[in-house]
Amino acid sequence: MSKRTVVVTGGGAAGLMAAGQAAENGARVILLEKMKRPGRKICISGKGRCNISNSADIPDFINHFGSNGRFLRQAFAQFFTPELLSFFQVHGLPVTLERGGRYFPASGKAPDILKTFLRWLGTLNVDIRNNSAVKNISADSGKLRIHVSGQKDTICDAAILTTGGASYPATGSTGDGYRFAESLGHTVIPVRPALVPLEVQGGLHPDLAGLEVRNAEVRLIVNGRQEGKQFGELHFIKTGISGPIILTLSGLAVDSLQAGKEVHLSIDLKPALDRKKLDKRLIRDFQKRHKEIFSQVLRGLLPAQLIPFCLEQTGIAGETEAGQISKKQRKQLLNWLKGLQFTISGHRPFSEAIITAGGINLKEVNPRTMESKKQPGLYLAGEILDLNGDTGGYNLQAAFSTGWLAGRSAARSTKK
Ligand SMILES: Cc1cc2nc3c(=O)[nH]c(=O)nc-3n(C[C@H](O)[C@H](O)[C@H](O)COP(=O)(O)OP(=O)(O)OC[C@H]3O[C@@H](n4cnc5c(N)ncnc54)[C@H](O)[C@@H]3O)c2cc1C
């Protein structure tokens, strides 16, 4: 019985896993990658350390993908975190668990993940063709025809599309796959940047750039209503506001902005103290240190970098003696500490978005196999799908799990 051919387009997390799985299940596998080498995004993931997964259980994991997360249930039932960890163990890559349930390679080096995959694919004789940008995929008498410019078309029994989303296009993920899928009858839910820094109306105050604030509570206000709340760390960057909690809220912010709604962030810099307790603390501090100037007393309350901004915004002169601060001024300060306001005017582009929201309509993909319901023999996996998770290893696990299932199904369905 001759082997049947599976062609994987796109050598990211999903494509590498799919290629290996298809080969392990008996297929002859060709992996087409448009860049000089596969896995560029893997190598920059997790700030170069690659947060491969999370210790959350399946229901919790699924919640991190919003309402579309349910689609992942079947893939996770077959290949989830324990299977991924044992995959890396079997292939000689120790993994470590860190704060927030996040798994990383123990070496702390993302390229070790890629090396592990390439070694595995080598042992399985997967034919990896770099510098091979697929231009078109078409149906051809029950088979699929893959066209790479300058090369002879490849005819295959199954094609796995793992071209990723449209974010960080310098890694090769330029959204090509959406067009291929559309030409085969799929619909694409409009793509937009997610896990992306937000821009502040009028630009960020230059004093703030580079400031990192821990233990803050941020509320996302849309048209005057609270639509999201996150506690943790945020970063002020030259172009706006970023950091884990802002990225988490960004999907909702981007969608609201695109719908023409007003978006604000309200930052509570002292979430551990309610207004009453914080007021008591201010009274105590101002009484105890009544001879010191206000800006000096603020050092006990705020990061030094925030103080000039606080003085400017509250209108309280820094040289005022703490004992001279009026009740009205104290209230102003209290309001500012509990609800520092920013009007959000936009978001950074795809080139700075960790992930792409939108993508191939999940209703058109069989979650048990990852096969297209529009084109037999076509499989889809990874970020190309209309799935976007929070930061914390969720997106890579989804890419590995859907890739695993697509590879296995594609090889099995093509067995004679
Ligand atoms: C800076 C950054 C940090 C991140 N950190 C994390 C993290 O720590 N943990 C986490 O879970 N997620 C993280 N993510 C998200 C995660 O990396 C992605 O969701 C995941 O890599 C998507 O995998 P994929 O295989 O679907 O697509 P991709 O990794 O985007 O791979 C797609 C591949 O297809 C190739 N390709 C595209 N078009 C064609 C074509 N026409 N022909 C041939 N090949 C083509 C591309 O060159 C690319 O190699 C991060 C993302 C970014 C940008």
Image: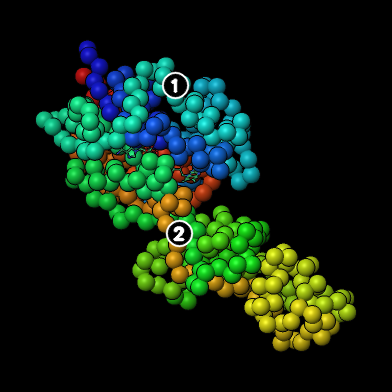
Q: Is residue 226 above or below residue 161?
A: below
Q: Earlier in the sequence, mark 2 or mark 1?
A: 1
Q: Position of residue 283 (x, y in %)?
A: 80, 79
The residue identified by callout 2 is 348
Q: Residue at x 43, y 51 (%)?
A: 351
Q: Amino acid at mark 2?
A: Arg
Going by the image, does 248 lie left or right of 172? Answer: right
Residue lying furthest top: 1
Quadrant of image for the N terminus: top left
Q: Are marks 2 and 1 in contact (CB under 8 Å)?
A: no
Quarter where residue 316 is shown: bottom right
Quarter where residue 375 is shown: top left
The residue identified by callout 1 is 120
Q: Nearer the viewer, residue 111 or 413?
A: 111
Q: Residue at x 46, y 53 (%)?
A: 352
**Crowding at label 1, few (<14), some or many (≥20) Cα neighbours within 10 Å?**
some
